Amino acid sequence: MQRNILIILFFALIVAIFAIQNANTVSISIFTWKYEVSLVIIVLGAIVFGAIIMGLVTSIKQIRLSRELRAVKNEREKLQETNRVLEKRIAQLKKEAGEAGKETELQSREVKDND
């Protein structure tokens, strides 16, 4: 975070130096309109416009990632619930298998005792 602030301050310093050194006016023509504007205003306007566009792009990406994260969390919760159900079923089957094994063992002993 501090690194980003330092980078922003560095670029702001470069823009400020550029603005001070290029304070003369320039002619701007847009369709049929003509304007005399300071070069500093043009540069600062371009920077602000670029920052706004970059903010919009970043916001759209953040919203998309947030939706994907929410979907992954929901899927994880469903899988965890399925896992719990399956673990209970495994425990139940092991218990039934253990009881069946005991019954088989008793039947084997009875057969041996009868022989």
Image: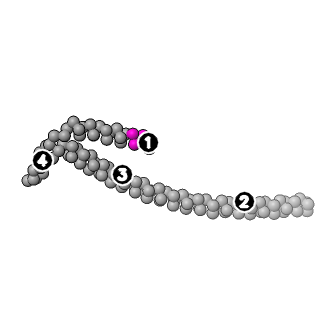
Q: Say whether residue 106 is left or right of residue 72.
A: right
Q: What is the three-letter code of the residue carrying label 3?
A: Thr
> Which residue is denoted by mark 4 in the rendering?
36
Please provide the residue range marked out in magenta.
Answer: 2-6
> Which residue is denoted by mark 1 in the rendering?
2
Q: Say whether residue 31 is left or right of residue 94.
A: left
The residue under the point 78% across, 63% down is 99
- The local secondary structure at tag 1 comes to helix
- The local secondary structure at tag 2 comes to helix
Which of the two discs, 2 and 1, labels the residue nearer the N terminus?
1
Tell me if mark 3 has few (under 14), some (14-19) or many (20+) residues whose alpha carbon lies within 10 angstroms of its own. few
Taking depth in this image into account, of 70 and 35 the one nearest to the observer is 35
Residue 29 shows up from this direction: yes
The residue under the point 18% across, 43% down is 39
Mark nearer the viewer, 3 or 1: 1
Whether pointer 2 and pointer 4 mark residues with C-beta atoms closer than 8 Å, the reply is: no
> Which residue is denoted by mark 2 in the rendering?
94
Label 2 and label 4: CA atoms lie apart by 86 Å
